[in-house]
Amino acid sequence: MRSQAGEQALAPEQIIRAFIGTSLRMIEDAKGGGRNFIRLLGRTYTEPEAQALIRKGKFVIQSRACMDCHTFFGNGAYYGPDLTKAWLDPAWERTWMPMTQQKTREGAMVEFLMHPETYPTWSRQMPDLSITREEAVAVVAYLKWMSAVDANGFPANFGMIKTTSASAEVPAGAPTTPAQANPAEGATLTEAQLMAEGKKGYLAHCAACHQTNGLGIAGTFPPLAAGKLFSASKAMLTPLAERGFYKDGKIVEGALEQHIDIVLHGIPGTPMTAFGAQLDNATIAAIVTFERNSFGNHTGEIVQPHAIGVARAAH
Ligand code: HEC
Ligand code: HEC
């Protein structure tokens, strides 16, 4: 009964009727669930309670103008990902659950919505919109409900956002990178300055995955401390080994050029985000210096902002 994008058949009439009605029965129709389908964060909602919650989630979404960046049912903008099926995004389990240390997808979504800047997974970041926990729970209910609606095959090919260097390119009209704004850009910084700024940058942009102590999370986010054991799927380990960061079951300190490349362009197909579009040269230089001389790593290498500019130009 599900129609696919590009098919001739139009949406069956009952889908349109269900779409117009706001009844939860739609969820039951779509998933064959019972009356208490909506279970959120350990609580079961009755149908009227769930309806009220979903309605509240919709109001939160309208009041914060989420559509300025996101698309819902084909309407809105594409600065951020399409949210029509966001609840089904495998990244909630693969990336955000371990990042937020939550045991459920709903819990991870609530944490992300309240602190999007703490849990970045993409080259563009979502701003903190001061969403309260109560509002976040309602938004999650709405997103979950929305994912159960038969959207006639859209969005096509739904899946995790690809972390490619292409997606790191800032689209026309988007806010420009802060690169021009940082006065440290052309400067030569001292080791102490780089280490202090690098620690700040690391805590803000990297620690949610690699952890404050640089030891990562087993099986999911690798340690940055060379010599530590790490195992994960082949799809994750192969690109690490290719870049010289993994050997004989352990993380090793790869070459500096590769390190800069990983931070600028991410590791496509894994949660390792491309930071080239959101961090300026001085911040990346400081973070890389900090990483290569912390957590038990002692390369002694000092990276200046200029070197990041050279790496950007060479790619
Ligand atoms: C200024 C633009 C902007 C606004 C406004 C915005 N977002 Fe986002 N949102 C983003 C970007 C960019 C991402 C990708 C961030 C990432 O993955 O780290 C994102 C990611 C998300 C995700 C994760 C999607 C997924 O599955 O990958 C959800 C859910 C989300 N936003 C919900 C909302 C809601 C709800 C609102 C309104 C309350 C909102 N956003 C407002 C830009 C925005
Ligand atoms: C969303 C989670 C996430 C964030 C945020 C993140 N990383 Fe990673 N990072 C990963 C994953 C996952 C891998 C392993 C990819 C693979 O298996 O191929 C990785 C790999 C790496 C590696 C190579 C492997 C190693 O252990 O040394 C480096 C270096 C690295 N990241 C640096 C950073 C830096 C610097 C930042 C912040 C600017 C950062 N990462 C932010 C998830 C993340």
Image: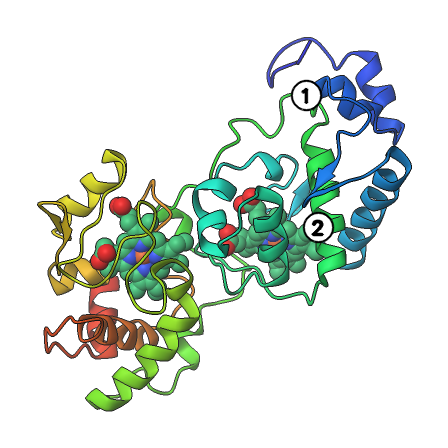
Residue 121 vertical position relative to residue 130 in the rendered view, above or below: above
Q: Nearer the viewer, residue 206 or 68?
A: 206
Q: Nearer the viewer, residue 229 or 182?
A: 229
Residue 283 vertical position relative to residue 142 in the rendered view, above or below: below
In the picture provided, is 299 more to the left or to the right than 236? left
Residue 46 vertical position relative to residue 242 in the rendered view, above or below: above
Secondary structure at badge 2 equals helix
Q: Does residue 65 show up?
A: no
Q: Nearer the viewer, residue 55 or 176?
A: 55
Mark 2 surroundings within 10 Å by alpha-carbon count, few (fewer than 14), some (14 through 19), many (20 or more) = some
Distance CA(mark 2)–CA(mark 1): 20 Å
Q: Nearer the viewer, residue 181 or 46?
A: 46
x then y, percent, for residue 4: 61, 16
In the picture provided, is 4 more to the left or to the right than 264? right
x then y, percent, for residue 62: 80, 52
Picture disc at residue 67: 2
Which kind of residue does numbered mark 1 sit on? Asn
Picture disc at residue 43: none
Please tell me which residue is depicted at 21% across the width and 41% down the height of the picture.
237
x then y, percent, for residue 199: 33, 78
Please tell me which residue is depicted at 60% across the width and 39% down the height of the picture.
86
Please tell me which residue is depicted at 72% across the width and 51% down the height of the picture.
137
Please tell me which residue is depicted at 73% across the width and 17% down the height of the picture.
32
Residue 259 vertical position relative to residue 281 in the rendered view, above or below: above
Residue matched to label 1:
152
Secondary structure at badge 1 equals loop
Ligand 1 has an atom within 8 Å of the beta carbon of the residue at disc 1: no
Residue 106 falls in image quadrant: top right
The N terminus appears in which quarter of the rendering?
top right
Ligand 2 falls in which quarter? bottom left
The C terminus appears in which quarter of the rendering?
bottom left
